Amino acid sequence: QVQLVESGGGLVQAGGSLRLSCAASGLTFSTYAMAWFRQAPGKEREFVAAISWTGSMRTGSNTYYADSVKGRFTISRDNVKNTVALQMNSLKPEDTAVYYCAARQWSTAQTMGVPDRNDYWGQGTQVTVSS
């Protein structure tokens, strides 16, 4: 059974930082592209960041970010711990949302920008950024 569990959310002031983590189990983690999405109340879920499956990683682009977070957020993966992290710096109130972890096998970061029916999803973790 594939399971993705997000953690690390919380309350932070604008300009602060948080580090989210997604722990994966029930899958060969290294073969999956991983991504973060977020959803604020009354809004549609939006793409945040993604990282390619390990075998596809070369000298090209292995990560992909939404324009709204580029330069502030960094996605990374640890294939030993089977986790993917999202380091969020310079947080803004508009970053407030529930953040979800997603996984898709054999995929590159760029393809994760649009959800797919075969994606696996976590339950989400709340991030609240105050002014």
Image (cartoon, rainbow, N blue to C red):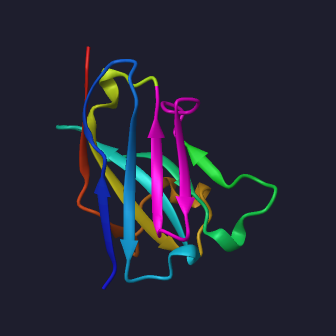
Magenta span of residues = 66-89
Residue 117 seen from this side: no
29 to 66, vertically: above or below: below
Q: Residue, x 54% and y 59% (percent of image)?
A: 77
Residue 53: % across, % down: 61, 69
Residue 62 seen from this side: yes
Residue 63: % across, % down: 62, 51
Residue 19 belongs to the span the image colors magenta: no
Quadrant of the drawing holding the N terminus: bottom left
Extreme-left residue of the structure = 41
Quadrant of the drawing holding the C terminus: top left
Q: How many discs mark residues in the rendered view?
A: 0
Q: Residue, x 46% and y 29% (percent of image)?
A: 89
Extreme-right residue of the structure = 59
In the drawing, does residue 95 fall left or right of residue 73?
left
Residue 55: % across, % down: 69, 74
Relative to the observer, which residue lies in front, 80 or 110? 80
Residue 72 belongs to the span the image colors magenta: yes
71 to 47, vertically: above or below: above
